[in-house]
Amino acid sequence: MSVDSKRTLRGSAAVLGVGETQYFKRGRSPHDEFKLALQAILAACADAGIDADDIDGFASFSDDRSDPSRLAAALGCRELRFANMQWGGGGGGVAGAVGNAAAAIHGGMAQCVVVLRALAQGQHGRFGLGQSDVIATAHDSHTVPYGLISPAQRYAMKYRRFMHEHGVGQSALRAIAMASYAHAQANPRAVMSGRPLDEAAYEASRWIVEPWHLYDCCQENDGAAALILVAAERAKEASHRPCYLLAAAAGSPYRAGAPAHNAFDYASANFKTVASRLYEMARLGPRDVDVLQSYENFTGGVLMSIVEHGFCDVDQINAFFRLDNLLAPHGKLPLNTSGGNLAECYMHGLGLILEAVRQIRGTSTAQVSDVNVSMVTGGPMVTPVSSLIFGSEATL
Amino acid sequence: MIGTYLRAGLPSPQPTALDAPFWEGLRQGRLLLQRCRACERFQWAPEWICHRCLSFDLGYAEVEARGMIYSHERVWHPVHPALADNGPYVVVLVELLQADGARIVGNLLGDPMQPLVIGAHIEGVFEHHTEHEPPFSLLQWRMADKAGGSQVRLA
């Protein structure tokens, strides 16, 4: 289905500022979750060179607990014009939230919108742990009593089917994990900085659930991240190289949400329809992308995301997913250059979006040379999923 | 049956208005799935409307508990306290043979280290949790030969 070129977000909004707190291991934040959100927003304001009271909108995802009205009150925002939540769990909505913020700006509903995510799992309970309730009801009752409980278990089932359909081996997953850890070693923000990962350590790591080793699974962390989105005309107000939104798309294919593992196209990250709309809006294709941040809940989700966004044919997977292809600065597809969710911080993917902005600015700790097109794929295998593409001024 | 595949203490199924006939069927040793009375096709998990013909006239009908392994996983890391000392276990996603492509989740009985093969034929075993209050039943699976006979005799 064609996107109406007159109704597009392409080039309509720009990222003026990015910011994050110190990133902590899960449960280690000394700060309240809401305080973390405030800290990240102020860091993004400082980066953008704006005052916090200029903010007039908030967008988030994954049922973030930092309520926009409380944020606006705490920050003394003169007026709240836009308060938006992208439905869906995990990081599926991370790029969608940026798209929603851009749509609000493009549509004249708001002028300066924060996209944020804050997590303090010591305070609020752990995301990746199974439920400890006495009963399982509704859709959970068809999986939980059989010991199929956690996200790792839910998505291992999908990826095992994908491996079967396409003849994929374990080495592809190892390369994805090692790329994140390699890039994290240069990044002082990364929780896994100083903790390199080699092939032997990956292979020796325990199974969580086959086919996921320990290092195929994201961390769980405390912290917060925020970015500030404004109209494209204001992109040069800050001192950084401007970063424009070229496209954002969210959604999922036919009956992706059919419960209890009955999705129509089961062995999928759910990006097939999203990816085509994304490229159409950006008026670009996968060959134009200079660097990719791809959400690692589990490494197999990254692999499926990359395939479904057209970076690799399904019959070339084992050859494509080699570590040297995924490393900055010279790999075919430099991947997760901050260390990503596996090794920088699992801020439900918002850290990946900040890193994509840094790649456009030229300020990554694993910088790829001459970046004009910088892409993010959000949390895979959930529904809805979302992706976005940023571009430099040259791409407009 | 004596004993259960997984240690006791996992959350037990709480039937809803949508799926109560399914759980009652398992208690009686029958696999009942939601079926549209208008277009006469199965859908799973149950919903208030038929996704094919948008009829609200839905009922339940029995299908044979026979299927093929559509996907599988061997779980090592316990995420629930009840499974702390359980050891590895196998979860299978079963494509039922007679239910318009409906899939159902269960455990594959037997050695957790047995080879797991997508496409292998399996057959249902009703696991009755009679000690639990209230009692409930799960549908588990074991390997079957392609002709339809069981490889394993009932204990």
Image (cartoon, coloured by chain):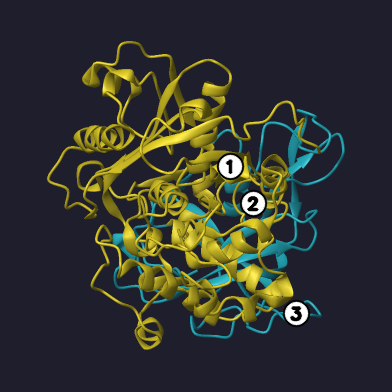
Chain colours: A yellow, B cyan
Cβ–Cβ below 8 Å for labels 1 and 2?
yes
Q: Gap between marks 3 and 2, in whole Å?
A: 38 Å
From the viewer's perspective, is residue B38 above or below residue B144? above
- Which-is-in-front pick, marks 3 and 1? 1
From the viewer's perspective, is residue A157 above or below residue A195? above
The residue under the point 49% across, 28% down is A101
Q: What residue type is labelled 1?
A: Pro
User: What is the quadrant of the C terminus of chain B in the image?
Assistant: bottom right
- In percent of width and height, residue B130 lies at 44, 57
Q: Nearer the viewer, residue A103 or A177?
A: A103
- What is the number of callouts on the image? 3
The residue indicated by pointer 3 is: B149
- Which-is-in-front pick, marks 3 and 2? 2
- In percent of width and height, residue A291 lies at 53, 60
- In percent of width and height, residue A317 lies at 65, 75
Residue B120 visible = no
The residue indicated by pointer 2 is: A270
Given the image, what chain letter belongs to the residue carrying mark 3?
Answer: B
The residue indicated by pointer 1 is: A384
The residue under the point 72% across, 52% down is A264
